[in-house]
Amino acid sequence: MKLENQIPRMTQLPFSSTVRPPKTVRIDSDLVIVGGGLAGTCAAITAARAGIKVVLVQDRPVLGGNASSEVRLWALGATSHMNNNNRWAREGGVIDEILVENMYRNKEGNALIFDTILLEKVVEEDNITLLLNTAAVSLSKSDGETIEAVTAFCSQNSTQYELYAPLFCDASGDGIVAFQAGAAFRMGAESSEEFGEKFAPSEEYGYLLGHSIYFYTKDIGVPVKFVPPSYALEDITQIPRFRSFNTATDGCRLWWIEYGGRLDTVHETETIKWQLWKVVYGVWNYIKNSGEFPDAETLTLEWVGHIPGKRESRRFEGDYMLIQQDIIEQRQHYDAISFGGWSIDLHPADGVFSEMPGCDQWHAKGVYQVPYRTQYSKNIRNLFITGRIMSASHVAFGSSRVMLTLASAAQSVGMAAAHCIQRDLLPRDIADPDNVKLLQRDLQRVGGYIPQFRLDDEENLVRQATVTASSKLCLENLPDDGPRQVLQRPYAQMLPIQRGRIPQMSVTVDVAEPTNLEVHLRTSSKLDNHSPDVILRSLSFNLPAGDNQVIDLDFDQLIDDSRYVFVCVMENPAVRLHLSNMRVTGLIALQYWRRQTPFEDIGVEEFEFWTPPRRPAGQNIAMTFTPPINGFDPQNICNGIARPTSQVNAWVADPQDPAPQLDIKWLMPQSISKVTLMFDTDFDHAMETTLRGHPEAVMPFAVKHYRLRNGDGAVLAQVADNHQTLNAIAFDEPIEINHLKIELVESQGDAPAALFAVQCYE
């Protein structure tokens, strides 16, 4: 068998007095993306699926950046471990697809498996040329404001690449392309006067976040000795929090092993890395050899990071700079393309050696919009800037820097690049109001979520149809078949209520001794927020001792808008609240966690956090409703919102319906080439990618088995083992139908069948 590119038996070259150039390969494409972290990866996949040719350049052997097995930080975003009030706030689109797939294959949180999923998603795209172990080293410009080509070198195959394209995207983290191109950037923290940001840090606190290196341990069952390397930190008391170390905490739970905030976090990364290695091996020496941790005898040091996870370096300037007020005030932007919701999370520059707490985290009452104008350079005409170099102040960066927020925003870059190529535009042109509407539409079509924006899609044929269903949920009760919740902390039920009078309700309790129980009806001060910061009505009940006591809740309250309300049963350890095992799309139970109380006027608000216990806990409250709670209508599938916001925004079938079916009918036959369905994969679940395991591989609300039929009953498509949010079904040839039946045959769990959206296109 003759192999392609077979080399001769021997190659011999004579001496050369001139410098030999490396093997050089030219690649022409539509878009060159430098940086294969989650932001660059999601931008590349989005652009490729939108039909343009992409070269993705990554200087590491794997994709994922800080989320990869080289660093092993869990990927998070607006859900913030589900420890804030941002309900159903997991990011959508490509990054949601990746997270859901990782849950399906890797609920244990193995960072190596996450590597394989990212690589698979990229190599499956024919429009992506992936260059791993390849570093961008220089560039050329056709004029002062336009990049012509990027030069990159792969050390593994000793090949130099000349990468030509009309568009470039810097997702490299340090901004190697944007920096060499001459784009305006910042490094450090702005003064509070520049943007009126009250949380701008002081000199004592410092102006940069540092790097971190993590380690993992393993119990091998027999004694293990540890001889520290000579460079290990000897005096563990140099770390003010050294008594916080223990044998049970490893990996990115030790995020506060941080250093470098007073150094040049671009050019002194190797210096920072060595200091972090000294700390890690010094910490392990302390744990193994100090005698204070006898349970460490059989532990071995399984893994230590070889490169640091970077938090902050350069931030480049776009036509808009995200600032603190955008986050806290949840400001509206005409060009919003994604959202954030992590706290403003700043760290002392001295990191692990600081006497201060490891971080200062301040949340907003809800998610905030990320404008498209933060995603391209204001100086370089054909350069997108995405990932952590996006246009944001240091304070706003404290929130926007987390990986899922960046990945979500980067998807807009991929889609915008496709629009630029297809319509002969430049990145700034997309910020035109008419152009950005098309960008927003196309992002929402593929599962992206933009707060306060509905998908207004005239091309979706479902909007012209009559939509009915075999049944819909009319919520009369959540059955009393679950555990009992001792009210050590307040417990609440979120309910989607239609405009008008609040239904009469009842709950059931067991009472250990005579007591008084208080129940609040609350809502949010902003319609789409989920912070229960407004008390509409309080009820108080004097209860005798005894089990199975039914409490009638007549709040006698009108609401002007359809929205979520919170029935909050307040703390009382003498009371056990009856819960329900029934889970329903758009319903969620919460516990009071803590109160955010700013220590001074730093431009953030004081409010309470009510957060959901994770499954298998977190059952809804057993309740009855008179009249029933509605709002689960089939027409929701074309209302332009594919997750709960101020309402459920889903069709939910009656739990007793043996064969849930949605019927979409047109007056005239339609030619349909593609059908897209969006299911409920629980956007409230944080889906941390590594270290922290999860109780289930699939979300119990998701539809597992469904069929599409025409009006005559012929099967057009069928999926028997779905676990994903978005299912796009493209037909080989357009089908002519005037009736589309969608049968939801089986769900992944016991929740009633639900569907957020249906799109049909010619």
Image: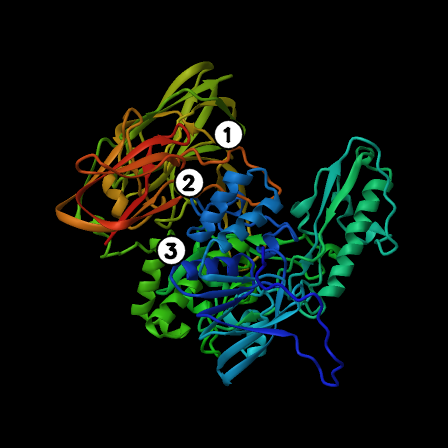
Q: Is residue 711 left or right of residue 718?
A: left
Q: Secondary structure at mark 2?
A: loop
C-alpha gap between disc 3 and disc 2: 18 Å
> Residue 608, position in %: x, y?
49, 44
For marks 3 and 2, the one nearer the N-term is 3
Residue drawn 46% across the image and 68% down it: 374
> In this rendering, does residue 506 appear at all?
yes
Give me the C-alpha separation between circle 2 and circle 1: 16 Å
Query: Where residue 681 is drawn, which disc sits there?
Result: 2
Crowd band around label 2 with a 10 angstrom C-alpha radius: few (<14), some (14–19), many (20+): many
Quadrant housing residue 51: bottom left
Residue 396 rendering spot, x and y as whole percentages = 52, 62
Label 3 vs 1, first from the N-terminus: 3
Q: Closest to the observer: 179 or 151?
A: 151
Quadrant assignment for the N terminus: bottom right
Q: Which residue is mark 3?
A: 450
Q: Looking at the image, which residue is at 71% across and 63% down? A: 260
Q: Of the residues shown, which amino acid type is indicated by label 3?
A: Ile
Amino acid bearing label 2: Thr
